[in-house]
Amino acid sequence: MKIRNNTIPSAGPWITDAEINLVTEAIKEGWGKKMNMHIDQFIEEFSDYTQLKYCLPTAHCTDAIHLALVVSDIGPGDEVIVPDVTWVASAAPIEYVGATPVFVDINTTNLCIDPDSFEQAITKRTKAVIGVDLLGNMADWKKINQIAKKHKLIVIEDAAQGLGATYRGQPAGNFGDISVFSFSGTKLITSQQGGIFATNDEELYEKAKMVSHHGINKKPGHEYFWSTTLGYNYNWSNIQAALALAQLRRIDEFLEYKAWLYHTYKSELKGIKGLKFNEKIYKNTQQSFWITYAILSPKYGLSKQKLVEDFQKYNIGTRPMFYPISSMPPFAKYMHNQEGKTGHEINPNAYRISDYSICLPNGYKLSDEDVRYICDAFKEILKKNNYQ
């Protein structure tokens, strides 16, 4: 197989004149009285798309998760349950507020939080659960909410990776007391950085709005520079909003591309023993296919790190599956209370799937030829490992 000279990146945005023109407008005109014009327009259109009443843009999605915990009055002595396989930002804000993260296992099919593992981890100290719509898949929100309601827990839906997906006919973000979204450079739509705190609860929204801007109450009649509570600087810029707004208006185009990419990968690699892809397991559910991932049988003897290195030899950029958060130095201490058990024993699905899974190139504008080259390289890598 001839190796290409140019590198295929693991990810990347799709920018057109639509984005350039709107950002240019924000740079030229978005000042003074118009400093929020694209922010306001984005909020309106994002709220319509997600069917969420109150949307508060933030500088990062991590900020939005932090706000969700703060306005839910979660702090020292409280426990928050979170799936073990997700981006670390799903869990880090739990420590920001002094609470204790409790890591639970994932479902083997959709890689989202496993409802049974979630329920088994609930204690008298549990105050909330953060469910993650991982890699464009949807968690089993019906069961999660039933369990949460039974135990009177706050539900935070981390939909950072779920925008564009639906569960039982409802858009991602509609299954938590609070939901959060991300617009980082690799997401379905991007503002390079940015996030959203969203809820249908006006009281939570107003509290988050104040906390996100130095604790200043912006309502008429309040002093402009007067902080009424400890707050943070999580504001979004109008320029970021302009970029995200142009991207949001193209979201159907992005979703169509991601579905094409997933089905092309699956078609080109069908019939390979010990190789699995994203799977749909719930009725009336639609994945966004934000990232196509491949789960490999351990019998190949190929760790995710080795796979990434092998793809690099073909000038193909891939990413390893997220590491179990409980395996990382800042969080490993939370697993030491499990009577000496290892992470592989406590959350076996999380560790096994993470060890042998990678995210295939998912950047926009890959051609048929690019995808065939990626798949041919994958086949050659697997052939060299002689698993029959």
Image (cartoon, rainbow, N blue to C red):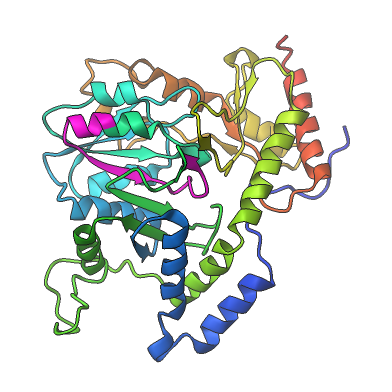
Residue 256 horizontal side relative to residue 373, left or right: left
Residue at 19% x, 60% y: name it.
Answer: 203
Quarter of the figure with the N terminus = top right
**Residue 127 within the segment the image draws in magenta:** no
x and y percent of residue 332 in the render? 30, 31
Quadrant in the rendering for residue 197: bottom left
Taking depth in this image into account, of 384 and 379 the one nearest to the observer is: 379
Taking depth in this image into account, of 343 and 71 the one nearest to the observer is: 71
Quadrant in the rendering for residue 289: top right
Residue 283 horizontal side relative to residue 227, left or right: right
Residue 269 horizontal side relative to residue 297, left or right: right
Q: Which residues are magenta?
A: 146-167
Task: Report the residue that reaches farthest toward the top.
Answer: 388
Residue at 79% x, 44% y: name it.
Answer: 370
x and y percent of residue 163 in the render? 49, 49
x and y percent of residue 206 in the render? 22, 65
Residue at 38% x, 65% y: name it.
Answer: 57
Q: Let me know if residue 375 appears in the view.
A: yes
Quarter of the figure with the C terminus = top right
Residue 182 horizontal side relative to residue 278, left or right: left
Q: Is residue 254 above or below residue 211?
A: above
